[in-house]
Amino acid sequence: MSFISYLVNGISLGSVYAIIALGYTMVYGIAKMLNFAHGDVIMVGGYAAFTMMMSMNTSPLVAVLVSIVVCTVLGVLIETIAYRPLLEAASSLAVLITAIGVSYFLQNIVLLTFGSSTKSFQSVVTLPNLKLAGGSLVITSTAIVTILACIVIMIALTLFINKTKPGQAMLAVSEDKGAAQLMGINVNGTIALTFAIGSGLAAIAGVLLCSAYPALTPYTGSMPGIKAFTAAVFGGIGSIPGAMVGGILMGVIEIFAKAYISTQLSDAIVFLILIIVLLVKPTGLFGKNIQEKV
Amino acid sequence: MANMLEVKHLGISFGGLRAVNEFELNIKKGALYGLIGPNGAGKTTVFNLLTGVYKPDSGSIMLDGDDITGKSTIEINKAGVARTFQNIRLFKQLSVLDNVKAGFHNSHKYSMFAGIFHTPSYRRVEAEMDEKAMEILKVFDLDKDASYLAANLPYGEQRKLEIARAMATEPKLLLLDEPAAGMNPNETQALMDMIQFVREHFGMTVLLIEHDMRLVSGICEELTVLNFGRVLAQGRTADVLNDPQVITAYLGE
Amino acid sequence: EEAAFKIGGIGPLTGAAAIYGNSALNAVQMAVDEVNAAGGINGYQVEFNAQDDEHDAEKSVNAYNTLKDWGMQMLVGTVTTTPCIAVAYECANDNLFALTPSASSPEVTAAGAGNVYQLCFTDPAQGTASAQYIGENMPEITKVAVLYNSSDAYSTGIYEKFVEEAEAQAFEVVETQTFTEDSNTDFSAQIQACMDAGAELVFLPFYYTEASIVLKQANEKEFAPVWFGVDGMDGILGVEGFDTSLAEGVMLLTPFAADADDEATKAFVAEFEEKFGDTPTQFAADGYDCVYALKAALEEAGATPDMSASDIADALKDAFTKIEVTGLTGTMTWNENCEVSKTPQAVVIKDGAYVAY
Amino acid sequence: MTVMIEKMKKKTRTNNLINYAIVIAAFAVIQVMKSTGNLSSLLNGLLIPVCSYIILAVSLNLVVGISGELSLGHAGFMSVGAFASAFFSKSMLDAIPFVPLRFGLAIVIGAAAAGVIGVLIGIPVLRLRGDYLAIVTLAFGEIIKNVITIFYIGIDGNGIHVSMKDKMSLHLEEGGNVILNGPQGISGTPKNATFLVGVLLVLITLFIVQNLINSRDGRAIMSIRDNRIAAESIGLNVTKYKLMAFTVSAALAGVAGALYAHNLSSLVASKFDFNLSILALVFVVLGGIGSIRGSIIAAVVLTALPEMLRFLSDYRMLIYAIVLIVMMLLNWSPKALELRERYLGRFFKKTAKEGK
Amino acid sequence: MAMLEVKDLQVYYGMIQAIKGISFEVNAGEIIALIGANGAGKTTTLHTITGLLSPKAGSVIFEGQDITKTPAHKIVGLGMAHVPEGRRVFAQLTVYQNLKMGAYTRKDKTEIDQMLETVYRRFPRLEERKNQVAGTLSGGEQQMLAMGRALMSKPKLVLMDEPSMGLSPILVNEIFDIIRSLNKAGTTVLLVEQNAKKALAVADRAYVLETGRIVQSGDAKVLMNDESIKKAYLGE
Ligand SMILES: Nc1ncnc2c1ncn2[C@@H]1O[C@H](COP(=O)(O)OP(=O)(O)OP(=O)(O)O)[C@@H](O)[C@H]1O
Ligand SMILES: Nc1ncnc2c1ncn2[C@@H]1O[C@H](COP(=O)(O)OP(=O)(O)OP(=O)(O)O)[C@@H](O)[C@H]1O
Ligand SMILES: [Mg+2]
Ligand SMILES: [Mg+2]
């Protein structure tokens, strides 16, 4: 029984990672940049929802929507101000470092605005929890909603990229920005759109993260951000199903490692498994192994 | 005369595509040999097989009597095969001189310790490399640009630098993949002279891929024509170029 | 210009531990303002300068040096343990006096070599006291589980003494679980293990931020043992948006509870809330008390601002073992090991408020 | 022609000498300030950390700039160096009372330990490429941190005791000494580091890295960075040279760690986390990838900046973040570079045709 | 009025001036060849026309509209396509996806399908390989793809940067035939070529570029017989 319970907990933790990872992988796969501020956008999403629900007393749904809008706008702003000038920079690492700067910036601006004290909010999901096996196995409604959201987002993103023009434009931009322009694709616009979507997802992730683990501080996003990024790589950078599977696996491994091996070493174990997987499959679980033509 | 290269039954597939099939090639020591064929015929793939970038599914490759089939790129280079690439691959952030000196890596050695502490052996070997590198650069008329970053050279010069770098590994067999691509007729003419000079002066065997018929007919003694991964014709240049099959498949007119 | 005592303060004002540093140092500033308004110490005003250390030993030493350049004569800090150890060595080296509001490890006083006094309980004292309290006052409890933060000195320190003392008590520690700073979002595995072990009481020697998640997740699993916390748990009711019903029945040993009804606490809480918008935690109370402890000692020693930092240190070291201070966190005296002695109070959360047990 | 080569070499030599000169000049200035009493406590306290960050930055530059691989776990190697050397010093406190010998050995041990871990990690990891390699280095950095955190090591009359549970499980006898105390790390490492030692170690690091770059091995490393396939085609052993760069870099990071550990009395594994790895990367990128001098300057500026901003109190880290972003934009955005070149062309020649 | 007019264009890379004030025009229905040695500035000129680079001075006018400041992605929509140097195919997309990308600005689905058919007819090899990932195509195949992709937008004016580079003799002839037939079908062509002989043979007029300046221009047939051109560019 406890095994199943661990599994369920792992999946719910994992699906939070997965949603974050979807945003990461999207930006990463298309704009080709490690947006280390992604975790902090999640945190901002959490604060936005918190403010709506606690100070404005709005319903959870409104809070979520506002949070999405806030993060989307934030994402586009960050992209325009801090990343776009470096799009043509000689090294892609330049943007990575700026992203770090943005991450510090977001943490500190929130620290100054909301203070350092922990905030908490009740789950935006108000449905009753699911009880199985006579109550000995509880699956929270937040977890169920998170998993469902994750699947819906994954399918929607896949369809979006493969079936729509802006999606196709993203593929082209991810490969060759110059050639994409020659096709008539607005590269800046496409990248901004990518950020908008990625950040919108971050808002959803933020709300769900804080719903499941209600302790919000200006630094809440960092560690889940890093773990979700790892999950995205685990699944294969740029691969949307990969991000989802990677995220869920990360969560399950983390919980199992805690349950059966060592709580202190759980992170080490998660990372070790990641390394082993990458050594066996160097482009992640779902990564395409593209051979460079010589 | 002994053969420098003997290739038998060579083949490779990519997915369902048989890119090279039952390929045969014999090149005499010191020859200047041409490999031609339509786009996508498998010429570059043959080079990749010869240099160990791809491992063949079938067949064997003998270099100067040694079997090099399935060996790694590095081993094959050490055995005496050097190449250039269809899409130029230079060490862009290194100087022209250093590009060539990198080619001397395996023939001119000193320890890491010597390198860090600038021991006399470091000085001696480096000086030797400098001298030899300049000698090669001079052949290609690149000596004046020795201190430029490779990335800053014009296209045609980059192609020549690739040849210079390959030569620095002191190969027995030099493989050139479309060395004249992107050059105008005058530049091509100069390149032809250089290739011939190199062959004579350094005693190398040269196998080259080229679409510029002026170059091919001007300097290649023998040709193999590849079509759909198979040998279409093989023999003396003049004969091959007059082969009606070759004309329909490749030359046109 | 009028001479004034220069008190430095160091703590994390940014970074993941910012909440502790801000609480403590804000309260220090508040106390300093009060003292000044009331005529200062020995007739002299007090200047306070708070510096951020981001909960990092290196930055903490930088902050310490900055304060030295400013002319600091004594230090309140540092707030967190690891940086405090590094700064304590510096204090010992420079013969500068420091009183830490909250760095509770015995290594702090050891490193300070007589120069660094603690105002909070030492971790061992809390661990021992907690085990004793459970053993003596809760005879119905036989199976106890411990969950602690193995990457944190404070939590580990309490845990160690708790387990040691538990040997002597009637209950049995049936399960020990840990978590780390890097994986403090999900506690389901640990909770499950405590459940499986049949724990009737779970001891939570760590801070309330994590505790709030533990309580929520346990609630989801319908696991409702007695929760027993330490002073770090204080503050849980102040978490904005927290469903306080989750904390119903939680017990903790703390020297301070924000809703105690003595006048001093009430006034302090009211003023703190007005100034900083948050309910003060035990960190704030400790910081506040630090100022009055220093005041008492400076008065005892008859120190004046024209004395050098080193002379003040000598005077304070001498005075501290002699004074008795009654503050928000109880009545305190200090031994020659620089450790405080004060009595913790057991409180339990009932109807969203602390009540004495 | 040899004239031209001589000129190139001279340029390289001058460039390297300038780096040594900058370090030595800075040392001299600081010494003068010290002796005239003009050195603030803050600045004095920053000297040694700055030296170790310079070493860290220069060593990371060897991986990121010279070998062209992104490493996000460099702090892990610094951590290994710091803990190995601090452990040694603390346990040999009585056995080797002669400080220069003990500290010297500690540095060597720190470097060796980090170097060994570098090899162990490098062998599997370097088979990966690009971002996958980066994520694995990040993972290793976290693993190192995590693993160091769970060890408790103590010494008493019966020798060394090790536990992975807690301090009590060491069962030390009376008078025993806990050296590595799990998450609380090592405290009370002797403060043997001095500015002079720091500067010497910086100079040694510069010497090793600069000379390595200008040697046959360095050329091979950079060739592989620029084009892996071409490098193989001229017989360069990719794994060997990547590993060489990685290991030397790890060992030097270990030196940085040893220096760091012997300056602070409180050493915890969590200091060497992802954020520190990133900070090191910031030094390298802000300073100009591959530029040793840039790394040095960036390490100094970025270590001092948050301290210099203390007067901003609450806004300090916010302004720091903004300054960092602005500096990055000014240093890297093509538009800014173009303007800079136009107006300050003489001083900043970025697109000079000639190489180093 | 000329279809494309380039006036006094100056382009810099940082401090280095690559184009030093060139002017030329392309009339509707013409094939114009731009020839010159390596590094003369041919590619730079094309990049500036399609907005990938912005000039320091001068203007580009397309069908009477000043497009000097028009962003690159808006140019295709105006009816100008660019087959870039080095092909620049989307290596990880399939041949089919690449071609679809060429019609990005086109909305009409049947029109797109029609164009696709036309392209497949011109380049049967592309149809054979339509599901192959473009990065693994041979050099010549990629060149065909790049051309096909540009045609997908049904351009009025096509700029081609060394389309014959790396192609087999038969394909070179074919490419020039295609250029000719494209032109017959009403497309105007601005052709940059190293293969000056072939380029001059198909072109109506030509401009000769040397280190960023136009040094000669005129009727292609006349230039072909010019002694200095022969010597410098035709290798005779
Ligand atoms: N890695 C690969 N995966 C799949 N197909 C490949 C790969 N490499 C080459 N091919 C295919 O193999 C065939 C031969 O390619 P190759 O590059 O050898 O041609 P080539 O004769 O050099 O042509 P060109 O003259 O155009 O350069 C082509 O059809 C190409 O698409
Ligand atoms: N990105 C760049 N940065 C700096 N200089 C450049 C850049 N691109 C081109 N140049 C320089 O501009 C000049 C013109 O280059 P361009 O590529 O336009 O020539 P081209 O006529 O197309 O030559 P090719 O026949 O080799 O394609 C050359 O001197 C080249 O070195
Ligand atoms: Mg080829
Ligand atoms: Mg060109």
Image (cartoon, coloured by chain):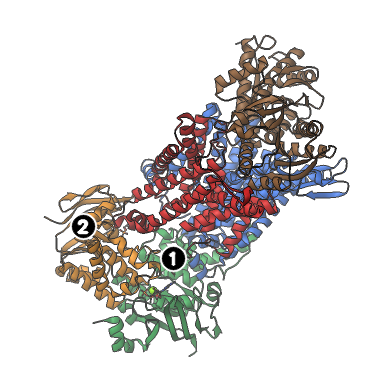
Chain colours: A red, B green, C brown, D blue, E orange
Answer left or right for B154 relative to D326.
left
Q: Nearer the viewer, residue A179 or A50?
A: A50
For disc 2, the neighbor class at 10 Å (few under 14, some 14 to 19, many from 20) is some
- Across and down, in percent, residue D3 comes to 47, 59
Q: Nearer the viewer's eye, disc 1 or disc 2?
A: 2
Number of numbered callouts drawn: 2
Residue B182 is at least partly visible in this image: no
Foreground residue among D45 and D128: D128
Disc 1 residue type (three-letter): Arg
Which three-letter amino acid code belongs to the residue tagged 2?
Answer: Gly
> Considering only vertical position in the picture, is B28 above or below E202?
below
Dot 1: chain letter: B
Mark 2 secondary-structure assignment: loop
| Left or right of B104 on screen, residue C79 | right
Q: Residues within 10 Å of mark 1 (few under 14, many from 20)?
A: some
Quarter of the image that includes the C terminus of chain B: bottom left
Of all residues, the one furthest to the front in this rendering is A134
Disc 1 designates what residue? B89
Q: Is residue C209 left or right of residue D167?
A: left
**Residue E214, quarter of picture:** bottom left
Rendered location of residue E180, percent (x, y): 19, 70
Q: Chain of mark 2?
A: E
Q: How many angstroms separate mark 1 from mark 2 (CA)?
A: 35 Å
**Quadrant holding ligand 1?**
bottom left
Determine whether the beta carbon of the residue marked 1 sits less than 8 angstroms from the nearest atom of ligand 3. no
* Rendering coords of residue B118 (x, y %): 61, 58
Q: Residue at x 47, y 32 (%)?
A: A51
Taking the image as drawn, is residue B246 in sight?
yes
Tell me the residue at 46%/77% (across/down).
Answer: B174
**Disc 1 on helix, strand or loop?**
loop
Please tell me the numbered disc located at residue E79.
2
Spot occupied by residue D189 in the image (x, y as percentages of width and height): 75, 40
